[in-house]
Image (cartoon, coloured by chain):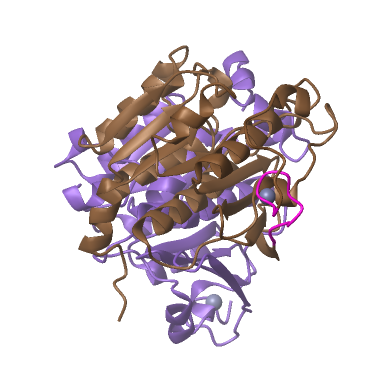
Chain colours: A brown, B purple
Amino acid sequence: MMNACFTPEERERLARASVLLIGCGGLGSPVAYELAAAGVGRIGLCDMDEVDLSNLQRQVLHHTADVGRPKVESGREKILALRPGTQVDLHPVTLTSENALELFRQYDLILDGSDNFATRYLVNDACVLTGRPQVHGSIFRFDGQVTTFVPGQGPCYRCIYPTPPPPGSVPSCAEAGVIGVLPGFIGSLMAMEALKLLAGRGTGLTGRLLIYSALDMDVAEVQIRRNPECPVCGDHPTIHELIDYEQFCGGVGA
Amino acid sequence: MSLTEQDILRYARHIIMPEVGGRGQKRIKAASVLVAGLGAAGSAAALYLAAAGVGRLTLWDPAELTEADLTQAIAHARSSLGQSRAASARGKLLAINPDAAVAASADPDALPDLVAGHQVVVATAGDWEAVQSAVLQAGASAVFAGVQGAAGAALAHRPGTACLGCIPAEERDRAGLRPEGEGCAVAAAGGVVGTVAATEALKLILDIGSPLTDRLWAYDGWTARFRETGVSRRPDCPLCGGD
Ligand SMILES: [Zn+2]
Ligand SMILES: [Zn+2]
Protein backbone atom coordinates (compact mmCIF):
# COMPACT_ATOMS: atom_id res chain seq x y z
CA MET A 1 0.00 0.00 0.00
CA MET A 2 1.44 3.35 -1.09
CA ASN A 3 1.74 6.10 1.49
CA ALA A 4 -1.17 8.52 0.97
CA CYS A 5 1.07 11.58 1.47
CA PHE A 6 4.79 12.28 1.04
CA THR A 7 6.99 9.80 2.94
CA PRO A 8 9.68 11.00 5.40
CA GLU A 9 12.29 10.32 2.70
CA GLU A 10 10.33 12.34 0.12
CA ARG A 11 9.85 15.17 2.62
CA GLU A 12 13.60 15.17 3.18
CA ARG A 13 14.05 15.71 -0.57
CA LEU A 14 11.52 18.54 -0.53
CA ALA A 15 13.33 20.17 2.39
CA ARG A 16 16.56 20.20 0.36
CA ALA A 17 14.82 21.50 -2.80
CA SER A 18 14.56 25.02 -4.16
CA VAL A 19 11.90 26.50 -6.44
CA LEU A 20 11.80 29.86 -8.21
CA LEU A 21 8.35 31.38 -8.76
CA ILE A 22 8.16 33.70 -11.73
CA GLY A 23 5.32 35.94 -10.60
CA CYS A 24 3.62 36.31 -7.21
CA GLY A 25 0.21 36.95 -8.70
CA GLY A 26 -2.73 34.68 -9.44
CA LEU A 27 -0.75 31.51 -10.20
CA GLY A 28 2.06 32.22 -7.73
CA SER A 29 -0.37 32.70 -4.82
CA PRO A 30 -1.55 29.12 -4.25
CA VAL A 31 1.87 27.78 -5.27
CA ALA A 32 3.64 29.80 -2.56
CA TYR A 33 1.33 28.52 0.18
CA GLU A 34 1.27 24.94 -1.04
CA LEU A 35 5.02 24.56 -1.56
CA ALA A 36 5.65 26.06 1.87
CA ALA A 37 3.04 23.78 3.48
CA ALA A 38 4.74 20.74 1.90
CA GLY A 39 8.06 21.83 3.37
CA VAL A 40 10.02 22.94 0.29
CA GLY A 41 13.23 24.29 1.81
CA ARG A 42 13.90 27.35 -0.33
CA ILE A 43 11.40 29.41 -2.32
CA GLY A 44 12.47 32.28 -4.57
CA LEU A 45 9.96 34.99 -5.43
CA CYS A 46 10.57 36.97 -8.62
CA ASP A 47 8.14 39.84 -9.20
CA MET A 48 8.60 43.58 -9.38
CA ASP A 49 4.93 44.58 -9.07
CA GLU A 50 3.12 46.08 -6.13
CA VAL A 51 -0.19 44.75 -4.83
CA ASP A 52 -3.18 46.44 -6.46
CA LEU A 53 -6.77 46.37 -5.18
CA SER A 54 -7.89 44.65 -8.42
CA ASN A 55 -5.46 41.75 -7.68
CA LEU A 56 -7.22 40.70 -4.48
CA GLN A 57 -10.15 39.01 -6.23
CA ARG A 58 -7.75 36.14 -7.14
CA GLN A 59 -4.29 36.70 -5.61
CA VAL A 60 -4.91 35.21 -2.17
CA LEU A 61 -1.25 35.57 -1.17
CA HIS A 62 -1.96 39.25 -0.53
CA HIS A 63 -4.17 40.88 2.07
CA THR A 64 -6.12 44.12 1.74
CA ALA A 65 -3.57 45.80 4.02
CA ASP A 66 -0.85 44.90 1.48
CA VAL A 67 -2.20 47.13 -1.30
CA GLY A 68 0.73 49.26 -2.51
CA ARG A 69 3.43 46.97 -1.08
CA PRO A 70 5.87 44.95 -3.22
CA LYS A 71 4.33 41.55 -3.94
CA VAL A 72 7.53 39.69 -3.04
CA GLU A 73 7.53 41.20 0.47
CA SER A 74 3.86 40.46 1.01
CA GLY A 75 4.49 36.92 -0.29
CA ARG A 76 7.42 36.31 2.04
CA GLU A 77 5.31 37.31 5.04
CA LYS A 78 2.56 34.83 4.18
CA ILE A 79 4.99 31.97 3.55
CA LEU A 80 6.71 32.60 6.89
CA ALA A 81 3.37 32.86 8.71
CA LEU A 82 2.55 29.35 7.50
CA ARG A 83 6.04 27.83 7.80
CA PRO A 84 8.65 29.99 9.50
CA GLY A 85 11.53 27.63 8.65
CA THR A 86 11.25 28.27 4.91
CA GLN A 87 14.10 30.18 3.28
CA VAL A 88 12.46 32.83 1.11
CA ASP A 89 14.70 34.69 -1.35
CA LEU A 90 13.33 37.86 -2.90
CA HIS A 91 14.05 38.96 -6.46
CA PRO A 92 12.12 42.20 -6.95
CA VAL A 93 13.30 42.55 -10.55
CA THR A 94 11.95 42.19 -14.05
CA LEU A 95 13.19 38.90 -15.47
CA THR A 96 15.43 39.77 -18.44
CA SER A 97 17.82 38.09 -20.86
CA GLU A 98 20.60 39.61 -18.75
CA ASN A 99 19.61 38.13 -15.36
CA ALA A 100 17.61 34.97 -16.13
CA LEU A 101 20.41 32.41 -16.55
CA GLU A 102 22.21 33.37 -13.37
CA LEU A 103 18.95 33.42 -11.44
CA PHE A 104 17.73 30.04 -12.75
CA ARG A 105 21.05 28.34 -11.91
CA GLN A 106 20.34 29.06 -8.23
CA TYR A 107 17.19 26.87 -8.22
CA ASP A 108 16.22 23.25 -8.88
CA LEU A 109 12.93 24.01 -10.59
CA ILE A 110 11.25 27.01 -12.20
CA LEU A 111 7.56 27.65 -11.95
CA ASP A 112 6.26 30.00 -14.64
CA GLY A 113 3.31 32.03 -13.41
CA SER A 114 3.97 34.93 -15.76
CA ASP A 115 1.23 36.69 -17.69
CA ASN A 116 2.86 37.63 -20.99
CA PHE A 117 4.37 35.86 -23.98
CA ALA A 118 7.77 37.57 -23.92
CA THR A 119 8.39 36.26 -20.38
CA ARG A 120 7.10 32.76 -21.27
CA TYR A 121 9.60 32.42 -24.15
CA LEU A 122 12.35 33.87 -21.99
CA VAL A 123 11.57 31.45 -19.14
CA ASN A 124 11.46 28.57 -21.59
CA ASP A 125 14.76 29.29 -23.29
CA ALA A 126 16.50 29.99 -19.98
CA CYS A 127 15.19 26.66 -18.60
CA VAL A 128 16.46 24.74 -21.65
CA LEU A 129 19.84 26.50 -21.55
CA THR A 130 20.29 25.85 -17.81
CA GLY A 131 18.72 22.37 -17.91
CA ARG A 132 16.07 23.31 -15.37
CA PRO A 133 12.64 21.65 -15.34
CA GLN A 134 9.72 24.03 -15.67
CA VAL A 135 6.11 23.74 -14.56
CA HIS A 136 4.09 25.94 -16.87
CA GLY A 137 0.61 27.34 -16.38
CA SER A 138 -1.53 29.95 -18.06
CA ILE A 139 -5.03 31.31 -17.57
CA PHE A 140 -7.56 33.16 -19.67
CA ARG A 141 -11.09 34.12 -18.51
CA PHE A 142 -12.54 30.70 -17.51
CA ASP A 143 -9.87 28.52 -19.13
CA GLY A 144 -6.38 27.39 -18.24
CA GLN A 145 -3.50 25.13 -19.26
CA VAL A 146 -0.84 23.24 -17.32
CA THR A 147 2.11 21.11 -18.31
CA THR A 148 5.68 20.29 -17.29
CA PHE A 149 8.72 20.78 -19.49
CA VAL A 150 11.78 18.74 -18.53
CA PRO A 151 14.81 19.38 -20.76
CA GLY A 152 15.89 16.16 -22.47
CA GLN A 153 12.70 14.30 -21.51
CA GLY A 154 10.01 15.89 -23.64
CA PRO A 155 8.98 19.02 -25.47
CA CYS A 156 9.62 22.60 -24.46
CA TYR A 157 7.25 25.57 -24.75
CA ARG A 158 8.68 26.43 -28.19
CA CYS A 159 8.07 22.89 -29.44
CA ILE A 160 4.33 23.39 -29.02
CA TYR A 161 4.17 27.16 -29.58
CA PRO A 162 6.94 27.88 -32.13
CA THR A 163 5.88 31.47 -32.70
CA PRO A 164 4.19 34.01 -30.45
CA PRO A 165 0.73 35.25 -31.39
CA PRO A 166 0.67 38.57 -33.28
CA PRO A 167 0.93 41.48 -30.85
CA GLY A 168 -2.47 42.64 -29.64
CA SER A 169 -4.27 39.47 -30.85
CA VAL A 170 -4.60 38.02 -27.35
CA PRO A 171 -6.22 40.37 -24.83
CA SER A 172 -4.63 40.69 -21.41
CA CYS A 173 -6.18 39.63 -18.12
CA ALA A 174 -7.15 43.26 -17.49
CA GLU A 175 -8.87 43.50 -20.88
CA ALA A 176 -10.56 40.10 -20.94
CA GLY A 177 -11.14 39.47 -17.23
CA VAL A 178 -10.59 36.28 -15.27
CA ILE A 179 -12.72 34.37 -12.80
CA GLY A 180 -10.87 34.73 -9.50
CA VAL A 181 -10.79 31.07 -8.54
CA LEU A 182 -9.28 29.96 -11.90
CA PRO A 183 -5.63 30.67 -11.01
CA GLY A 184 -6.28 28.90 -7.71
CA PHE A 185 -7.05 25.68 -9.57
CA ILE A 186 -4.30 25.99 -12.18
CA GLY A 187 -1.72 27.13 -9.61
CA SER A 188 -2.58 24.27 -7.25
CA LEU A 189 -2.14 21.76 -10.09
CA MET A 190 1.24 23.38 -10.83
CA ALA A 191 2.27 23.11 -7.19
CA MET A 192 1.32 19.41 -7.09
CA GLU A 193 3.37 18.75 -10.24
CA ALA A 194 6.37 20.65 -8.85
CA LEU A 195 6.21 18.66 -5.58
CA LYS A 196 6.04 15.33 -7.43
CA LEU A 197 9.03 16.21 -9.58
CA LEU A 198 11.11 17.34 -6.58
CA ALA A 199 10.11 14.40 -4.38
CA GLY A 200 10.62 11.90 -7.19
CA ARG A 201 7.18 10.37 -6.92
CA GLY A 202 4.18 9.85 -9.20
CA THR A 203 3.54 10.37 -12.90
CA GLY A 204 4.18 13.91 -14.05
CA LEU A 205 2.86 15.98 -16.93
CA THR A 206 5.90 15.67 -19.20
CA GLY A 207 4.48 15.26 -22.71
CA ARG A 208 0.94 15.90 -21.45
CA LEU A 209 -0.85 19.25 -21.72
CA LEU A 210 -3.95 19.68 -19.53
CA ILE A 211 -6.62 22.01 -20.89
CA TYR A 212 -9.18 23.14 -18.33
CA SER A 213 -12.58 24.75 -18.68
CA ALA A 214 -14.06 26.04 -15.42
CA LEU A 215 -17.46 26.67 -17.04
CA ASP A 216 -17.69 23.06 -18.24
CA MET A 217 -15.65 21.74 -15.28
CA ASP A 218 -13.72 19.64 -17.71
CA VAL A 219 -10.04 18.75 -18.04
CA ALA A 220 -8.89 17.50 -21.44
CA GLU A 221 -5.48 16.00 -22.02
CA VAL A 222 -3.43 16.45 -25.18
CA GLN A 223 -0.22 14.53 -25.93
CA ILE A 224 2.62 16.89 -26.81
CA ARG A 225 5.95 15.90 -28.39
CA ARG A 226 9.41 17.33 -28.72
CA ASN A 227 9.96 18.93 -32.12
CA PRO A 228 13.32 17.81 -33.59
CA GLU A 229 13.33 21.11 -35.51
CA CYS A 230 12.84 23.20 -32.33
CA PRO A 231 15.29 26.12 -32.42
CA VAL A 232 16.17 25.76 -28.74
CA CYS A 233 15.77 22.07 -27.77
CA GLY A 234 15.79 20.38 -31.21
CA ASP A 235 18.48 18.21 -32.78
CA HIS A 236 20.27 21.21 -34.29
CA PRO A 237 19.44 24.16 -32.06
CA THR A 238 20.05 27.65 -33.40
CA ILE A 239 19.41 29.47 -30.11
CA HIS A 240 22.47 29.13 -27.87
CA GLU A 241 21.96 32.24 -25.77
CA LEU A 242 19.02 34.36 -24.68
CA ILE A 243 17.63 36.76 -27.29
CA ASP A 244 15.54 39.94 -27.23
CA TYR A 245 12.12 38.57 -26.26
CA GLU A 246 10.23 41.86 -26.49
CA GLN A 247 11.33 42.11 -30.09
CA PHE A 248 10.62 38.39 -30.74
CA CYS A 249 7.06 38.90 -29.47
CA GLY A 250 6.52 42.02 -31.52
CA GLY A 251 7.54 44.70 -29.11
CA VAL A 252 4.76 44.36 -26.52
CA GLY A 253 3.86 41.99 -23.75
CA ALA A 254 0.42 40.40 -24.01
CA MET B 1 -27.31 44.82 -3.05
CA SER B 2 -25.42 47.51 -4.94
CA LEU B 3 -21.71 47.73 -5.64
CA THR B 4 -19.56 50.44 -4.12
CA GLU B 5 -16.83 52.27 -6.01
CA GLN B 6 -14.28 50.13 -4.14
CA ASP B 7 -16.16 46.97 -5.19
CA ILE B 8 -15.95 48.02 -8.83
CA LEU B 9 -12.16 48.43 -8.55
CA ARG B 10 -11.65 45.25 -6.52
CA TYR B 11 -13.79 43.04 -8.76
CA ALA B 12 -12.89 44.70 -12.07
CA ARG B 13 -11.62 41.38 -13.57
CA HIS B 14 -15.00 39.77 -12.85
CA ILE B 15 -17.17 42.69 -13.87
CA ILE B 16 -15.53 43.00 -17.29
CA MET B 17 -16.65 39.47 -18.23
CA PRO B 18 -20.15 39.15 -19.69
CA GLU B 19 -20.70 35.86 -17.79
CA VAL B 20 -20.38 37.77 -14.50
CA GLY B 21 -20.75 41.51 -15.11
CA GLY B 22 -21.93 44.01 -12.53
CA ARG B 23 -25.12 42.02 -12.16
CA GLY B 24 -23.28 38.80 -11.39
CA GLN B 25 -20.96 40.51 -8.94
CA LYS B 26 -24.02 41.82 -7.08
CA ARG B 27 -25.35 38.26 -6.93
CA ILE B 28 -22.03 37.09 -5.47
CA LYS B 29 -22.17 39.91 -2.93
CA ALA B 30 -25.73 38.98 -1.97
CA ALA B 31 -24.84 35.29 -1.63
CA SER B 32 -24.35 33.34 1.58
CA VAL B 33 -22.14 30.26 1.70
CA LEU B 34 -21.54 27.82 4.54
CA VAL B 35 -18.13 26.13 4.42
CA ALA B 36 -18.06 23.02 6.59
CA GLY B 37 -14.52 21.90 7.34
CA LEU B 38 -11.41 24.08 7.08
CA GLY B 39 -8.92 21.36 6.20
CA ALA B 40 -7.13 20.89 2.87
CA ALA B 41 -10.06 21.43 0.48
CA GLY B 42 -12.21 23.66 2.70
CA SER B 43 -9.34 26.09 3.30
CA ALA B 44 -8.77 26.70 -0.40
CA ALA B 45 -12.51 26.93 -1.11
CA ALA B 46 -13.07 29.46 1.67
CA LEU B 47 -10.12 31.67 0.66
CA TYR B 48 -11.28 31.91 -2.94
CA LEU B 49 -14.94 32.46 -2.07
CA ALA B 50 -13.97 35.35 0.21
CA ALA B 51 -11.64 36.79 -2.43
CA ALA B 52 -14.39 36.49 -5.07
CA GLY B 53 -16.65 38.73 -3.01
CA VAL B 54 -19.18 36.37 -1.40
CA GLY B 55 -21.00 38.70 0.98
CA ARG B 56 -21.69 36.31 3.83
CA LEU B 57 -19.63 33.28 4.80
CA THR B 58 -20.12 30.92 7.71
CA LEU B 59 -17.22 28.65 8.62
CA TRP B 60 -17.85 25.53 10.65
CA ASP B 61 -15.09 23.34 12.05
CA PRO B 62 -14.90 22.04 15.63
CA ALA B 63 -11.25 20.93 15.37
CA GLU B 64 -8.46 22.85 17.03
CA LEU B 65 -5.70 24.08 14.71
CA THR B 66 -2.63 21.84 15.02
CA GLU B 67 0.90 21.73 13.59
CA ALA B 68 -0.23 19.03 11.17
CA ASP B 69 -2.93 21.35 9.76
CA LEU B 70 -0.26 23.86 8.75
CA THR B 71 1.25 21.27 6.40
CA GLN B 72 -2.04 20.62 4.61
CA ALA B 73 -4.44 23.55 4.88
CA ILE B 74 -3.61 27.04 3.56
CA ALA B 75 -6.21 29.23 5.29
CA HIS B 76 -4.29 29.16 8.56
CA ALA B 77 -1.19 30.64 10.16
CA ARG B 78 1.14 29.41 12.87
CA SER B 79 0.11 32.31 15.11
CA SER B 80 -3.42 30.81 15.26
CA LEU B 81 -2.33 27.48 16.80
CA GLY B 82 -4.70 26.59 19.59
CA GLN B 83 -7.67 28.42 18.06
CA SER B 84 -10.44 26.47 16.39
CA ARG B 85 -9.82 25.97 12.67
CA ALA B 86 -13.02 27.94 12.02
CA ALA B 87 -11.78 30.95 14.01
CA SER B 88 -8.31 30.73 12.48
CA ALA B 89 -9.67 30.71 8.92
CA ARG B 90 -12.07 33.54 9.76
CA GLY B 91 -9.12 35.78 10.63
CA LYS B 92 -7.40 34.93 7.33
CA LEU B 93 -10.54 35.51 5.24
CA LEU B 94 -11.16 38.90 6.80
CA ALA B 95 -7.54 39.93 6.12
CA ILE B 96 -8.12 39.12 2.45
CA ASN B 97 -11.57 40.66 2.28
CA PRO B 98 -12.66 42.86 5.21
CA ASP B 99 -15.96 43.58 3.43
CA ALA B 100 -17.18 40.00 3.87
CA ALA B 101 -19.36 39.10 6.85
CA VAL B 102 -17.61 35.98 8.17
CA ALA B 103 -18.96 33.97 11.08
CA ALA B 104 -17.15 31.04 12.69
CA SER B 105 -18.66 28.12 14.56
CA ALA B 106 -16.65 25.50 16.44
CA ASP B 107 -19.73 23.85 17.98
CA PRO B 108 -19.62 20.18 16.90
CA ASP B 109 -23.42 19.92 17.06
CA ALA B 110 -24.21 23.08 15.10
CA LEU B 111 -23.68 21.75 11.59
CA PRO B 112 -26.95 20.53 10.14
CA ASP B 113 -28.85 23.46 11.70
CA LEU B 114 -26.38 25.97 10.23
CA VAL B 115 -27.44 24.96 6.71
CA ALA B 116 -30.73 26.87 6.87
CA GLY B 117 -30.19 30.46 5.82
CA HIS B 118 -27.38 29.72 3.35
CA GLN B 119 -27.74 29.65 -0.40
CA VAL B 120 -24.89 27.19 -0.96
CA VAL B 121 -23.13 24.74 1.34
CA VAL B 122 -19.54 23.66 0.60
CA ALA B 123 -19.17 20.51 2.66
CA THR B 124 -15.67 19.09 3.13
CA ALA B 125 -16.12 17.60 6.60
CA GLY B 126 -18.79 16.61 9.08
CA ASP B 127 -21.84 14.37 8.73
CA TRP B 128 -22.57 14.70 5.00
CA GLU B 129 -25.84 12.76 5.09
CA ALA B 130 -27.18 15.16 7.73
CA VAL B 131 -25.93 18.12 5.67
CA GLN B 132 -27.59 16.76 2.52
CA SER B 133 -30.88 16.25 4.36
CA ALA B 134 -30.80 19.80 5.69
CA VAL B 135 -29.92 21.10 2.21
CA LEU B 136 -32.89 19.24 0.73
CA GLN B 137 -35.18 20.59 3.42
CA ALA B 138 -33.94 24.17 2.92
CA GLY B 139 -34.04 23.96 -0.88
CA ALA B 140 -30.40 25.08 -0.92
CA SER B 141 -27.54 23.96 -3.15
CA ALA B 142 -24.43 22.10 -2.07
CA VAL B 143 -20.99 21.01 -3.17
CA PHE B 144 -19.47 17.99 -1.47
CA ALA B 145 -15.69 17.81 -1.81
CA GLY B 146 -12.80 16.26 0.06
CA VAL B 147 -9.19 15.18 -0.24
CA GLN B 148 -7.34 12.20 1.19
CA GLY B 149 -3.62 12.16 0.52
CA ALA B 150 -3.27 13.66 -2.95
CA ALA B 151 -6.60 12.42 -4.32
CA GLY B 152 -10.08 13.78 -3.97
CA ALA B 153 -13.52 14.10 -5.46
CA ALA B 154 -16.46 16.49 -5.75
CA LEU B 155 -20.18 16.48 -6.49
CA ALA B 156 -22.59 19.41 -6.76
CA HIS B 157 -26.29 19.32 -5.93
CA ARG B 158 -29.12 21.72 -6.51
CA PRO B 159 -32.84 21.10 -6.06
CA GLY B 160 -34.01 18.39 -8.44
CA THR B 161 -30.62 16.82 -9.17
CA ALA B 162 -29.03 13.68 -7.72
CA CYS B 163 -28.19 14.08 -4.06
CA LEU B 164 -25.41 12.49 -2.06
CA GLY B 165 -27.71 9.66 -0.99
CA CYS B 166 -28.55 8.82 -4.62
CA ILE B 167 -24.99 7.50 -4.99
CA PRO B 168 -24.41 4.17 -3.24
CA ALA B 169 -21.86 4.51 -0.44
CA GLU B 170 -19.48 2.02 -2.13
CA GLU B 171 -19.51 4.05 -5.33
CA ARG B 172 -18.75 7.27 -3.44
CA ASP B 173 -15.97 5.52 -1.62
CA ARG B 174 -14.48 4.14 -4.84
CA ALA B 175 -14.40 7.64 -6.31
CA GLY B 176 -12.87 9.07 -3.13
CA LEU B 177 -15.89 11.23 -2.28
CA ARG B 178 -15.65 11.31 1.53
CA PRO B 179 -15.55 13.96 4.23
CA GLU B 180 -12.04 14.89 5.29
CA GLY B 181 -11.10 13.41 8.64
CA GLU B 182 -8.00 12.44 10.54
CA GLY B 183 -5.93 11.22 7.58
CA CYS B 184 -3.18 13.26 5.97
CA ALA B 185 -3.69 15.46 2.93
CA VAL B 186 -1.36 17.24 0.50
CA ALA B 187 -2.17 20.97 0.55
CA ALA B 188 -1.71 21.30 -3.22
CA ALA B 189 -4.25 18.54 -3.89
CA GLY B 190 -6.56 20.25 -1.39
CA GLY B 191 -6.09 23.38 -3.47
CA VAL B 192 -7.13 21.58 -6.64
CA VAL B 193 -10.25 20.02 -5.13
CA GLY B 194 -11.13 23.03 -2.95
CA THR B 195 -10.98 25.44 -5.88
CA VAL B 196 -13.22 23.11 -7.87
CA ALA B 197 -15.71 23.32 -5.00
CA ALA B 198 -15.44 27.13 -4.95
CA THR B 199 -15.83 27.29 -8.74
CA GLU B 200 -18.96 25.17 -8.57
CA ALA B 201 -20.38 27.26 -5.72
CA LEU B 202 -19.85 30.42 -7.81
CA LYS B 203 -21.38 28.79 -10.91
CA LEU B 204 -24.45 27.84 -8.85
CA ILE B 205 -24.71 31.39 -7.48
CA LEU B 206 -24.29 32.94 -10.95
CA ASP B 207 -26.25 30.23 -12.75
CA ILE B 208 -23.58 29.94 -15.47
CA GLY B 209 -21.79 27.07 -17.19
CA SER B 210 -22.38 23.35 -16.73
CA PRO B 211 -22.39 22.56 -13.03
CA LEU B 212 -21.08 19.35 -11.46
CA THR B 213 -24.64 18.26 -10.72
CA ASP B 214 -25.29 14.61 -11.61
CA ARG B 215 -21.54 14.30 -12.17
CA LEU B 216 -19.15 12.64 -9.74
CA TRP B 217 -15.74 14.21 -10.42
CA ALA B 218 -12.42 12.84 -9.17
CA TYR B 219 -8.76 13.89 -9.23
CA ASP B 220 -5.69 11.80 -8.55
CA GLY B 221 -2.72 14.03 -7.87
CA TRP B 222 -0.09 11.28 -8.12
CA THR B 223 -0.97 10.60 -11.75
CA ALA B 224 -2.54 14.00 -12.62
CA ARG B 225 -5.59 12.18 -13.96
CA PHE B 226 -9.22 13.27 -13.80
CA ARG B 227 -12.24 11.03 -13.95
CA GLU B 228 -15.94 11.70 -14.17
CA THR B 229 -18.90 9.38 -13.63
CA GLY B 230 -22.47 10.29 -14.43
CA VAL B 231 -24.92 9.81 -11.56
CA SER B 232 -28.68 10.15 -11.48
CA ARG B 233 -31.48 10.60 -9.05
CA ARG B 234 -32.76 7.39 -7.49
CA PRO B 235 -36.43 7.07 -6.53
CA ASP B 236 -35.45 4.85 -3.59
CA CYS B 237 -32.79 7.28 -2.29
CA PRO B 238 -32.87 7.29 1.52
CA LEU B 239 -32.38 11.09 1.55
CA CYS B 240 -34.34 12.56 -1.37
CA GLY B 241 -36.55 9.65 -2.50
CA GLY B 242 -40.29 10.07 -2.33
CA ASP B 243 -40.48 13.87 -2.30
ZN1 LIG C 1 11.66 22.71 -27.88
ZN1 LIG D 1 -31.02 11.39 -3.31
Instruction: Tell me which residue sits at (35%, 38%) in the image.
Output: B103
Quadrant assignment, res B16 = top right
Please say if B80 is above or below B229.
Answer: above
Coordinates of residue B43 in the picture (x, y in percent): 38, 47
User: Magenta residues?
Assistant: A224-235
Magenta stretch, overall SS: loop
Closest to the observer: A214 or B208? A214
Q: Which residue is pictured at 31% across the width and 64% down the height?
A: A5
Q: Quadrant of the C terminus of chain B?
A: bottom right
Q: Is residue B213 left or right of residue B196?
A: right
**Magenta stretch encompasses residue A238:** no
Relative height, residue B30 to residue B168 (above, below): above
Q: Report the front residue among B179 and B175.
A: B175
Q: Is residue B96 left or right of residue A187?
A: left
Which x, y percent locates residue B102? 39, 35
In front of the other: A219 or A107: A107
Q: Is residue A77 left or right of residue B178?
A: left
Image coordinates of residue A21 in percent, x first then y, are 46, 35
Q: Looking at the picture, does residue B26 appear above or below residue A194?
A: above
In this view of the protein, can residue B57 be seen by the observer?
no
Residue at left offset 35%, top offset 36% = A43
> Is residue A228 rendered magenta in the image?
yes
- In the current view of this chain or complex, which residue is farthest to the front? A236
The vertical placement of A143 against A25, above or below, is: below
Q: Does the rendering let one see residue B6?
A: yes
**What is the total number of numbered labels drawn onto the structure image?**
0
Residue A252 coordinates in the image, percent (x, y): 76, 21
> Which quadrant: the N terminus of chain B?
top right
